[in-house]
Image: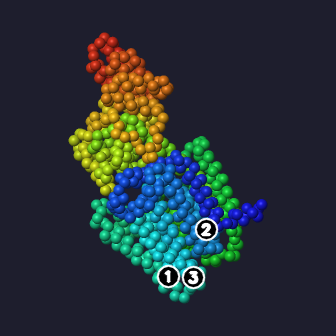
Amino acid sequence: MKAFVLKIVQKPWLFPLALLFIGVLAYGLIIPSLGFYWDDWEGVYLYQLHNPAISFQYYSERPLSAIAYLLLFPVAKMTPVVWQIVSLLLRWGGVLFVYYTLNLVWPSRQQQNRWVAALLFVFPGFLEQPVSVAFGQHLTTYLFFACSLFLTVLALRQPKLFWLWMPLSILLGGLQIFMMEYFVGLEIIRPFLIWLTMQSMEKRKGLFGKVLLYWSPFVIVLAAYGYWRFVSLPPTLGVDPNTPALLKTILRSPIAGLSSLAIVVYQDSLHMLLTIWPQSFLDTTKMDINSKRVWLSWLCGAIACIAYGLYNQNSNKQDAEHFNDHSTVQLIFLGIIILLFGALPVWATGKQIAVGKWSERFTLAPMLGAVILVVNLIDWLFRTHRQKQVLLTLLLGISISGQMFNQIVFRNDWIIQKKIYWQLHWRVPSLEPGTALFGKGTFTDKSSYYDGTYIVNLLFDNPVRQDPRYAYFDIYHTGLDDYIPGSPLSQVLRSGQFAGNTSKSIVFDFGVRGGCVRVLDSIFEGDPDLNSSVADLFDISDVSTIKAIPDLAPNFDIFGAEPPHNWCYFFEKADLARQMQDWETILQLKAEADASGYEPDVAAEDLPFIEAYAQTNRWDQAYQLSLAAHEIGSGSGMALCNAWRRFAQFDSSAEMLSYTGKASQEFCTEGNP
């Protein structure tokens, strides 16, 4: 039996499956619960335009990056789970080609190469795997680059098929550079691989000239890219988002620029080689040590890494005497080159891997160098095979556990996103075209303020248009000093533009304090639970742009199925009915909410129901609900005081005067004049 197992383990087809198993465990277990994040919304919006011609002008600084979407859109469409699977397979394919390339150049180090592949697949420095649509471009480029390297070496190993493999390698290599510049710095490793491959084939005569000959087509492509990127492209861009700021600083002031570069190189290299491994496992700011999910991620990581370690130990066992004496030195040198030149395009723009939100994306190119360095330094520094395997197994377990927990963080964020989107739909079923939406910051932690415009158009418009009919403005990024009616608004959205005015806008609060999403209306003035920054914008929140009859329901493929009707559903619908002065509907919603046992967590969410009672002369119920609301939030007196002052204008009956008097004494204290 043992002999049979060893025979199966040593089959070459088993490693890709073992690698995929690691990926599925690290990324795939909660794929059905993941959604769209950050710049995913650009891709979603582009797809919904259903116009392939727009794709190439959509990303003006990287026009050929649209090729990735033209390839992936027909497959993945706009279903989150499909995008997650496609993203996982793209990364798996890229890692496999890296592994096969290493095996072609260093065939005696297959065991170490397997560790490189496994750690590269779950490298804890890259945490954006769930951002599947946006990074579909990056991972497609990654796959093309890895495949191009593999085909270059394969062309030299199989001379009879040289004229098939080498042109295909040049095509993929050129295509990936013009698609995205992420891997442009790694072109420097191709001549090194060509040199070592030809040297191992004992083709040493005229070796230097042959290396230059085989590399020359790629150099020509690289030169063409450099001319296009730095000469032809900049005049066509209004603002270059990836201008080489640090490179310009070095040219102007070499000493200051190089000093800055040295500091960044040191910090980022230390981060990728050392800091990132324990950080992914022990970051208490992101994980609750008492959470069952954290312990589950640790358990799964332990099981997976032990299983992989046993597999790798029993497959293709090798003796150190078969190693090329220089292979360790060669791989360490290769790792250093990849680490430095992979990050060079990032550093040239003045950005840094270890600093800034979403900066983990910059590890995509240099992480291969970091992993090769870590694996081969361990192989060189530790004496026994057992010591090496234990340490590598530990690193793999840490990486898998860290990625699993990261998936949970993204899953939780998508749950919050869907709540916000559906609550917005319930409160704003239809919105007049040309309306601007204002809010504070991002919708959630895993989104960005500039993607808000894509989201609100996907939510309120069907079909979406190249020039959007709605726009989201984060109050911190509008450029307005004062938020007053009549101020013009403009927002450029890739290939489209929104033009509006603060006189036609609504302001909403995300409900980040445990409450529901709220569109600002005068009824909520004085509510302390409103975000203080948003609470100053009542003057520009015009709810008359909201219509009660929906134009469309949110796209289920994009926003998920409508969630169960909880308290926030009844509140949003009641607030909409209050705007429409449909008091009987509000009372019906209140009865349904009470029957289901739903209650608010925020005092002001009772205000629409309190007003409905007042408007229908149910003064005792209005007063009793006001008292209950005041108990929920003791600081809600100002909002309740304002509400009852409005109620005093409804009629002059004795009952009304009695209850407004009691409400005034209860809520309109000296602290709430």
Q: Picture quarter containing residue 607?
A: top left
Question: Separation of disc 1 and disc 2 at Cα?
Answer: 24 Å
139 to 299, vertically: above or below: below
Question: Separation of disc 3 and disc 1 at Cα?
Answer: 10 Å
> Residue 129 at what x, y percent from top left?
50, 55
Q: Is residue 450 left or right of residue 501?
A: right
Q: Which residue is mark 1?
A: 211
Q: Is residue 111 left or right of residue 440?
A: right
Q: Picture quarter containing residue 588?
A: top left
- Taking the image as drawn, is residue 571 in sight? yes
SS state under label 2: helix
User: What residue type is disc 3 on?
Assistant: Gln
SS state under label 3: helix
User: What residue type is disc 2 on?
Assistant: Asn
Numbered badge on residue 199: 3
The crowd level at tag 2 (other Cα within 10 Å; few <14, some 14-19, many 20+) is: many
> Residue 85 at what x, y percent from top left?
52, 54
| Placement of the C terminus among the 4 image quadrants | top left
- Taking the image as drawn, is residue 387 in sight? no
> Residue 621 at what x, y percent from top left?
40, 18
First in sequence, mark 3 or 1: give its number.
3
The crowd level at tag 3 (other Cα within 10 Å; few <14, some 14-19, many 20+) is: some
First in sequence, mark 3 or 2: give its number.
2
> Residue 272 at what x, y percent from top left?
52, 61
Contact between labelled residues 2 and 3, with CB atoms less than 8 Å apart: no
Q: Which one is nearer the viewer's eye here, 144 or 659?
A: 144
User: What residue type is disc 1 on?
Assistant: Val
Q: Which residue is mark 2?
A: 113
First in sequence, mark 1 or 2: give its number.
2
SS state under label 1: helix
Q: Which one is nearer the viewer's eye here, 245 or 616?
A: 616
Residue lying at the far right of the rendered structure: 1
